[in-house]
Image: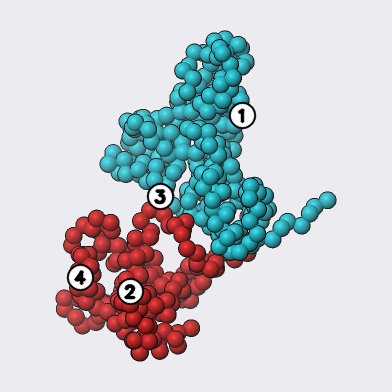
């Protein structure tokens, strides 16, 4: 039995517009936005019913192959929302904002990050990639500028000269990465989502997100691997 | 588009089939809808659109820059907020269809004139712009009789 999906109101539309404009929106910001939209468009505001509000929008986005998806940040464990493209073609969301050569650099950078041990690619390594692009060689200065734009647009995150995938990118590309990098992409042992940055057990090789590690070991006196029970060698964040 | 996103597709050039997306939703207060330097750029744009309207819908580039110089915005100088202002006005705003530049024929050196672009006409109105000017100058919009009747007559 299907129930008629609730109608979209201007509050839903405004919420969607802002979400799309932001690229990625943090949980508490999304809750404030929910309230703001309901108040502005004089729609009944059900406090704490953000997920229902989003479901309504999603039921209308589904036939358009889009969704508002929730993802957890690998840095602080906080929930974030992003509008994603469900059509499973490579990097389609970014396709119209960047040139072909920029997209190629991004694809190669993403690959470097996925294949890395700690989920980071150094700026030196990425600049070397720029030199080997198939489409056309990119000069170092140009590549630096493109990286800057990727960070501004929240596809990449930079820390101490090293780059990793931004939460926005992970939310958008998770399915693509899990299917195309099946053998190398790591899944967190606790929450079972894609893990780009992770701590790995030295004995059995399972990986966990840093916030997941923090949560899991909080209640334990002695940190031990949930799978093989060996002593957890990494520093607990 | 209007149903799900609250946006409308408007054709601004029938010959070249150019379209823009216009927001259907009533304008809201607050900081939500602005990214990066959008708000500041829109502020500058509004001032430029106002100047053009108040001066009879068309201004020569010389006059526009003279006016902007009074606001300490110079074409040759890098601005603290706007950066390369000449590029912003002549390229970005015109590419986005907020402004339209046409060259004035038979001028040497070539001169240009600025008018509102089709996006400006869709996103704001002469009435809104006149009210903005009136607010800044602390006067009633009817103070400018000819602009007022033009704004009232506009669709």
The picture places residue A122, in percent across and down from the top left corner, at 36, 30
* Secondary-structure class at tag 1: loop
Left or right of B149: which side holds A55? right
Which chain is represented by cyan in the image? A
Residue bearing the label numbered 4? B70
Number of marks in the rendered image:
4
**Disc 2 or disc 1, which is closer to the eye?**
2
Disc on the earlier residue, 3 or 1:
3
Q: CA distance from mark 4 to mark 3?
A: 39 Å
| Nearer the observer, B122 or B16 | B122
* Separation of marks 2 and 1 at Cα, in angstroms: 56 Å
Q: Residues within 10 Å of mark 3 (few under 14, many from 20)?
A: few
Q: Secondary structure at mark 4?
A: helix
Q: Is residue B18 above or below residue B143?
A: above
Q: Please determine if labels 2 and 1 lie on a single subunit.
A: no
Q: Residue at x 45, y 71 (%)?
A: B123
A11 vs A108: above or below:
below
The residue beneath circle 2 is B136
For the residues marked 1 and 4, what is the alpha-carbon distance in whole angstroms? 59 Å
- The residue where tag 1 is placed is A191
């Amino acid at each position: 039995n299907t129930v008629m999906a609730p109608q979209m109101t201007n509050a839903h539309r405004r919420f969607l517009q802002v979400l799309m404009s932001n690229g990625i929106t943090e949980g508490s910001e999304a809750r404030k936005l929910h309230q703001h939209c309901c108040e502005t468009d004089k729609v009944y505001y059900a406090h704490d019913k953000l997920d229902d509000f989003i479901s309504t929008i999603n039921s209308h986005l589904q036939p358009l192959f889009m969704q508002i998806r929730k993802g957890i940040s690998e840095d602080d464990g906080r929930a974030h929302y992003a509008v994603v493209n469900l059509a499973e073609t490579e990097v389609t969301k970014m396709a119209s904002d960047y040139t072909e050569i920029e997209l190629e650099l991004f694809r190669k950078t993403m690959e470097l990050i996925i294949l890395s041990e700690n989920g980071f690619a150094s700026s030196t390594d990425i600049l070397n990639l720029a030199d080997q692009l198939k489409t056309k060689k990119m000069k170092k200065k140009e590549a630096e500028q493109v990286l800057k734009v990727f960070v501004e647009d929240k596809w990449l995150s930079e820390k101490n000269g090293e780059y990793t995938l931004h939460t926005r990118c992970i939310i958008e590309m998770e399915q693509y990465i899990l299917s195309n990098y099946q053998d190398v992409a790591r899944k967190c042992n606790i929450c079972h989502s894609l893990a780009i940055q992770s701590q790995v057990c030295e004995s059995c090789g399972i990986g966990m997100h840093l916030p997941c590690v923090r949560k899991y070991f909080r209640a334990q006196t002695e940190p031990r691997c949930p799978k093989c029970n060996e002593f957890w060698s990494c520093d607990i964040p | 588009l209007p149903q799900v996103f609250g946006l409308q597709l408007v054709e601004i050039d029938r010959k070249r089939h150019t379209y823009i997306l216009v927001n259907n939703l009533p304008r809201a207060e607050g900081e939500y809808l602005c990214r990066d330097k959008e708000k500041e750029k829109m502020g500058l744009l509004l001032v430029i659109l106002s100047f053009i309207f108040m001066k009879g819908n068309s201004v020569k580039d010389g006059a526009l820059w003279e006016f902007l110089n009074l606001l300490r915005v110079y074409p040759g100088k890098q601005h603290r907020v706007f950066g390369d202002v000449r590029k912003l006005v002549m390229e970005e705003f015109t590419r986005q269809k907020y402004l339209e530049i046409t060259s004035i024929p038979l001028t040497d050196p070539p001169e240009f004139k600025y008018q509102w672009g089709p996006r400006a006409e869709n996103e704001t109105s002469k009435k809104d712009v006149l009210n903005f000017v009136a607010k800044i100058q602390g006067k009633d919009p009817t103070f400018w009789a000819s602009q007022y009747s033009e704004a009232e007559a506009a669709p």
